[in-house]
Image (tube, helix red, strand yellow):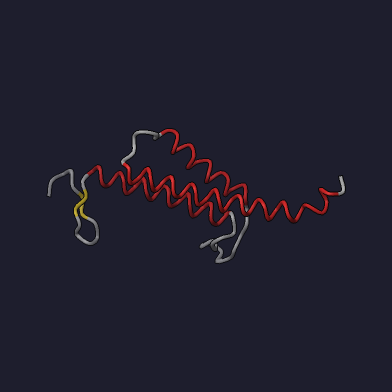
Amino acid sequence: MSENEKTSPNNEKFSPDQQQQLLFMMLIQQHEQIAMMGMGKVKNPATDKIERDLKSAKYAIDTLVMLDKFTEGNLPKELDDFLSQTLTNLRLNYADEKKKDSGEEAGSADDK
């Protein structure tokens, strides 16, 4: 095995470029999980509870938006598509959660 190849636990060889792409996908997935936890869509693995924190969800989504802008035109199609699909999914879920908040506050907003 050359210095430029690493072996995964399954003895699959990845080129340095493939390793970088895998790490990039893992970074996207980490922020997706943070956002989904913040939206109360999945349990926090540390507490095993659903915890809703839309500010942390927005921060995770904004971080992915920044990555999308800074990598524009520099990602392989598969990674670009993965990032775009992830952002679309997160944005739709976030909009849904914000709408729930607006619905709860609608009674007090109508009084103004």
Position of 40 compared to 105: left or right?
left
Please say if 47 is above or below 60.
below
Residue 48 percent across, percent down from the top left: 55, 66
Q: What residue is drawn where x is 27% and y is 47%?
A: 19
Q: What residue is drawn where x is 48% and y is 52%?
A: 32
Q: What residue is drawn where x is 43% and y is 52%?
A: 29
Q: Between 88 and 18, which is closer to the camera in this rendering?
A: 88
Residue 81 percent across, percent down from the top left: 38, 46
Residue 94 percent across, percent down from the top left: 59, 51
Query: Which residue sits furthest right?
Result: 111
Residue 110 percent across, percent down from the top left: 84, 49
Question: Where the C terminus falls, by quadrant?
Answer: top right
Position of 24 compared to 111: left or right?
left
Q: Quadrant of residue 84?
A: top left
Please say if 39 is above or below 84.
below
Q: Between 54 and 88, which is closer to the camera in this rendering?
A: 88
Q: What residue is drawn where x is 65% and y is 50%?
A: 98
Q: Between 24 and 82, which is closer to the camera in this rendering?
A: 82
Query: Which residue sits furthest bottom?
Result: 48
Position of 9 compared to 111: left or right?
left
Total marks drawn?
0
